Image: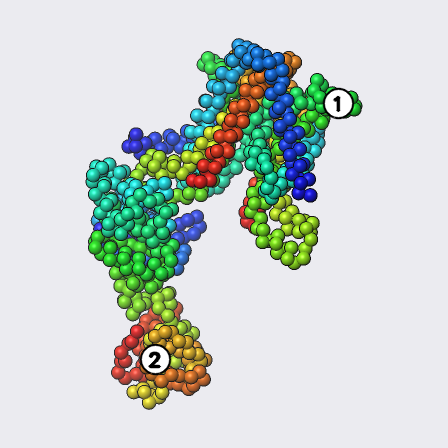
Amino acid sequence: MNSLLRHKGWTWGFRTTILLYFVVLIVLPILGVYYNSFSLGFGTFAESLSDPIAWKSVFLTLKLAIIATLFNVAAGTMIAWVLIRYKFPGKALLNSLVDLPFALPTAVGGLMILLLLGPGSLIGGMAEALGFEIVFHQPAIVIAMIFVTFPFVIRAVQPLLEELDPSEEEAAYTMGAKGSRVFWRVIFPSMAPGMIGGGMLAFSRALAEFGAVVLVAGNIPGRTLVSSVFIFGEVESDNPVGAAAVSIILLTLSFLILWLINMLQMRGRRS
Amino acid sequence: MRNLWIGLTYLIFFLLIAAPLGKMTMSAFSQGFGGFWDALARPEALHALMMTGFVVIVVTVFNTLFGIMLALYLVRANWIHPRLKGLLNSIVDLPYAVSPVIGGLMIVLLLGPDSALGALFENMGIKIVYAFPGMAIATLFVTFPLMVREVMPVLQEIGSQQEEAASTLGAYGWTTFWKVTWPSIRWAVIYGVILTVARSLGEFGAVLVVSGNIMNKTQTATTLVYQDVENFNVTAAGGVALVLAAFSVGLLLLMEWTKRRKEVH
Amino acid sequence: MHVEVRGLNKHFGDFHAVKDVNFSITKGHLIGLLGPSGGGKTSILRMLAGLETPDAGEIIFHGRAVNNLPPQERGIGFVFQNYALFKHMTVFENIAFGLKVKKASKTAIRDRVMELVELTGLKGFEKRYPHQLSGGQRQRVAFARALAPEPQLLLLDEPFAAIDAKIRQELRSWLKELIERVGITSIFVTHDQDEAIEVADEIMIINQGRLEQKGTPWDIYKEPKTPFVATFIGESTLIENAAELKGFTGIGGGKPTKALIRPEYIEIGSLHEFKMASATEQGIVKHLHFRGSEWLVEVEVKGHKLVTYRSLEKDTLQPGQDISVLVHRAYLFNDDHSWIQENGLKEDPMPVFI
């Protein structure tokens, strides 16, 4: 085996296989989508997007993803704080549970929300009696997005809080600063990169979410039809070019966010 | 103040995680253990679980082998120009940014029956889209960064000196990898495998688009859950979903355990 | 092993790390590669080991070019700066690695490892893991591991850099003795001149990728070939215009010439202590520093600050005191060349005392 592998031809073939696999699996499909959406000319691309169902789905996705992200940034920061700073029974359990939404299949997550809040359930019934509609309406989509992106902010803020030197905080106290002042001047700035970075990851994931959303959304065009579900519908109705047009809007947005996160991380490393 | 925050944290965990999980369990057993068993014993449910199993195995094997190799190349190779290496490195993350549905769409556009490549394969008698190969490829696409991103930081941290030392002592690549590199990256690889299994077990969007969700042929456990919900068969969906959830929780526990091992070594 | 290097060059991107280096090393010698950090020493060592590929030039072991041989086939031992011990192997397994790779028999491996364990004073530590050892012990393991496959050439990259100053001294003499006993040609990299002078048979001074000078420590000290070597080895003071000093007027054919003067080139005392009073300068004692075994005296002569030593046996000087200063010799250099010149006014050469 060893002497066989030492041969130059083997090495070369091996390297080529790995890099080719990489390019064919990742790069080619992405280029394919961009190619396809412009394959019938820019006119067709613009036409696909001018369909109100298409652009409304994009805006709806953006709006709901922003709401879900804001919630997660706030709740996630608080939970990270509680899990790092306080000692209380059940802390280790909660800390492990944070990752559950990552581990659970998204379709299962969607089903869980549907069952809990659905028409036949206790909460669903109560909300209906009060005149709220949750499932098959926008609140359910936001809840689904919150569920699947739940761990991002927590996992981004936790290490920053852990690293925070307690002496920095103590120094502020010895200088006579009050609790709230110390929080806003010392603690908050060191958590901020995690909140922004984790928030952006959560946002990009919420934009892309499909499994959980498709099960709980009513998928009514213009009101509860998000982009990923729209794309799925287009594929089902055999209109891949229309699907590709909306796809590249979402893709470009996601790549931008990814790039921004990378830039932020690099700046963080330099400072 | 402190108790308020802790209480709020518990509340969020309860509402967002414990309650839905509990509700789903109850719903799966709403017609007793028999109902749960019937949901699982349906031929399409067994077939779907089997398909999921196949996808998980194939994807995990491929992703592990190629992921380790690529991580080695991206960290160690001096035959790749640094700038190209930087570019490849950022490409690795792209699947994170791609919605699974779009990932599936990409495979359909590239290899579907209407595409040139797809037609070529069809003439050779190989069906890719709406068949097992397409599902595996779509899942490979989605899970691609997991292994690379687990192994790369460990390789960077251990540095190349131990490997260089082995080479000055007469060991060639293969021996060096197994005797020197592997023991250091072992736990990262195991962690990557668990992540890959979890992700390919739960992959839904990409597989749904690529598989066509054909019952008893290309249906996986997650797409069966979707179909059951669409058919208003909530109890059956709950049964299959509960099995998936149990696997996920098991994998999560395994993840916690590996993480601890990883920190020790 | 006889080592020869011809026209060695190496670039890292735009950085020219090694510039046209030539040298040859006699079998059995212990060579120190000395120079400031980032000067290209480690690159040269790594190219000898085959861990880097030279852009140009030849590396010849025993009359055979080894440029195309991978490190595995060069018959070298390499000791890394941070030892690079295999962290999940015991001391025994670390030392045995090279022998196992060569498929030596179990008993042969055992005998050789135990021999090295004895030699390096690691007996009783065979079952320990690297993280259970002290820095000095790790260094010994790295050394034993490199020696185990009986290499022809031993290369050591800053072998003492990661060790406490106290143990370093002890390890230096241990290493020198051990290499002499094993009789292996060795090259080590260091940025510490004391270390190089103490351990090496011969020193090569490397600066900015160039080989500045090669020779025994004494030769290099006595006759530095370049201004860099003169400043790098030993202490010295730089005089911008050497012609101002008595006994050195008219040097360099009128060209601006600088001088480097070592403390031991200077003698100070009352005028009557000198045979040739005309060769002395008048100076003022500026500062006195007690150095444990002698005084370090700073004197000012014509606005130049010179540094010299003075025996504790002689009269103790006071700051501000007038004093006669004799500069026995100086290392002179200008844009064209550099040379060592004796004081022209001094009749009989004074013995040099270091």
Residue at image point 22% right, 51% down: C1
Residue C265 visible in image: yes
Q: Nearer the viewer, mark 1 or mark 2?
A: 1
* Nearer to the camera, C309 or C60: C309
Quadrant in which the N terminus of chain A appears: top left
Q: How far from the left and from the top, in percent, is residue A270?
A: 55, 49
Residue position marked by numbered label 2 in the rendering: C312
State the SS at label 2: loop
Type of amino acid at the residue the image marks with label 1? Met
Provide the chain ID for the residue under circle 1.
A
Q: Position of residue A221 (x, y in %)?
A: 72, 21
* Left or right for C219, reference A141: left
Image position of A268 (left or right of C149)? right
- The foreground one among A263 and B117 is A263
* Residue in the picture at 58% in, 53% down: A167
For this orientation, the residue located farthest to the top is B43
Q: Residues within 10 Å of mark 2 (few under 14, many from 20)?
A: few
Identify the amino acid type marked 2. Leu
Q: CA distance from mark 1 to mark 2?
A: 100 Å
Residue drawn 62% across the image and 13% down it: B31
Q: Is residue C109 above or below residue B103?
A: below
C2 lies left or right of A168: left
Residue A126, disc: 1
